[in-house]
């Protein structure tokens, strides 16, 4: 009976964590470039049940399931829809011909100076005249340096070349460093839309023709609100089912303690 309580409790914990993940997805459905997380539920290894007093090889009565757990939480890296904003500093990254499973990202400088990655192209020009994310992190060019634009009067070509308007026409400032990551499942969220790469294969600069930059657009999140709400309801029902099982075991134990063996 105690094992059954543990199994039901494990199911409740797994569904609670799944519900928290789905809530995060729903909260970020309007965050540009956000990639929805997916949960992988796995069962604990089954336990062999052996009759008391039997030898090591004898008295086996069968297997007992030990419940489920949420093994991992991974992001679903699929292209989101494009939304036109008209802002010169809003940039959408469209994937072209890349290897299956690979993903392209803007390269960002973190507070500690290391490279981070994002699909959120909702950029701005900070007080020092540098192209930056809404969280204040600098956007990097192919030379590894910050991109200084001075103001938002810029033009960005499809290959990521950034031009500023001058009295004599246009001047090339830099080129956006678009990075190809072949193991996007090894990216870790750090907040503010930034991702840290911990894969075994080194991230490399994307080749020409594998991407297209659209100025005046942002990539919307790939969260499907209808599907997410449906999965949240399913997680809630599963949680409630395990809760009822746990309550049933609790009432059985209470009766065992109070009624079984009572004299008279």
Image: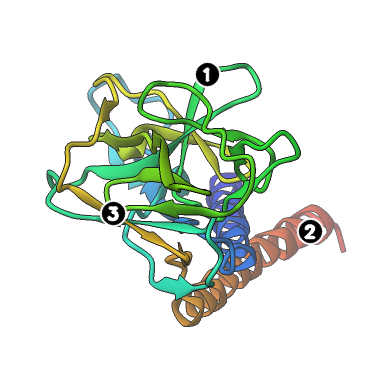
Position of residue 55 in the picture relative to residue 98 (left or right): right
Residue 98 coordinates in the image, percent (x, y) = 14, 46
The crowd level at tag 2 (other Cα within 10 Å; few <14, some 14-19, many 20+) is: few
Name the disc covering residue 153, or none: none
Contact between marks 1 and 2 (CB within 8 A): the answer is: no
The crowd level at tag 3 (other Cα within 10 Å; few <14, some 14-19, many 20+) is: some
Mark 1 and mark 2 lie on one chain; the one further toward the N terminus is: 1
Q: Secondary structure at mark 3?
A: loop
- Report, in whole angstroms, how far the alpha carbon at label 1 lies from the one at label 2: 58 Å
The crowd level at tag 1 (other Cα within 10 Å; few <14, some 14-19, many 20+) is: few
Where residue 113 sits, quadrant-wise, is top right
Residue 33 coordinates in the image, percent (x, y) = 47, 57
- Report, in whole angstroms, how far the alpha carbon at label 3 lies from the one at label 2: 70 Å
Mark 3 and mark 1 lie on one chain; the one further toward the N terminus is: 1
Residue 174 coordinates in the image, percent (x, y) = 41, 34
Q: Which residue is mark 1?
A: 114
How many numbered discs sit on the rendered protein? 3
Q: Secondary structure at mark 2?
A: helix
Q: Which residue is depicted at the point 44% across and 49% down? A: 119
Q: Which residue is depicted at the point 34% across and 45% down? A: 160
Q: Is residue 256 above or below residue 196?
A: below
Where residue 127 sits, quadrant-wise, is top right
Judging depth in this view, the residue of 208 and 99 nearest the camera is: 208
Q: Which residue is mark 3?
A: 158
User: What is the residue that sits farthest to the right in this orientation?
Assistant: 264
Q: Which residue is depicted at the point 70% across and 65% down? A: 247
| Observer able to see residue 47 | no
Between disc 1 and disc 2, the foreground one is 1
Name the disc covering residue 254, or none: 2
Contact between marks 3 and 1 (CB within 8 A): the answer is: no
| Observer able to see residue 142 | yes
């Amino acid at each position: 009976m105690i094992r059954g309580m543990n199994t039901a409790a494990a199911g409740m914990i797994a569904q609670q964590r799944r519900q928290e993940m789905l809530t995060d997805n729903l909260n970020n459905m309007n965050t540009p470039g956000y990639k929805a997380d997916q949960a992988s539920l796995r069962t604990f290894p089954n336990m062999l049940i052996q009759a008391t007093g039997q030898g090591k090889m004898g008295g086996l009565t069968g297997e007992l399931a030990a419940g489920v757990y949420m093994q991992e939480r991974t992001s679903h890296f699929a292209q989101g829809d494009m939304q036109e904003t008209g802002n010169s500093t809003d940039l959408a990254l469209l994937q072209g011909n890349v290897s299956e499973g690979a993903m392209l990202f803007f390269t960002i400088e973190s507070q500690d100076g290391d490279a981070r990655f994002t699909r959120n192209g909702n950029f701005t020009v900070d007080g020092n005249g540098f192209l930056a994310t809404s969280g204040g992190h600098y956007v990097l060019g192919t030379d590894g340096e910050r991109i200084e634009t001075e103001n938002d009067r810029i033009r960005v070509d499809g290959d990521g070349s950034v031009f500023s308007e001058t009295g004599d026409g246009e001047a090339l400032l830099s080129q956006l460093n678009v990075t190809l990551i072949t193991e996007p499942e090894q990216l870790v969220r750090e907040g503010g839309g930034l991702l840290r790469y911990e894969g075994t294969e080194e991230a490399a600069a994307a080749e020409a023709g594998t991407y297209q930059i659209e100025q005046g657009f942002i990539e919307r999140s790939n969260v499907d609100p209808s599907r997410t709400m449906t999965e949240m309801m399913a997680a809630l029902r599963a949680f409630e089912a395990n809760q009822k099982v746990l309550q049933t075991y609790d009432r059985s134990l209470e009766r065992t303690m109070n009624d079984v063996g009572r004299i008279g």
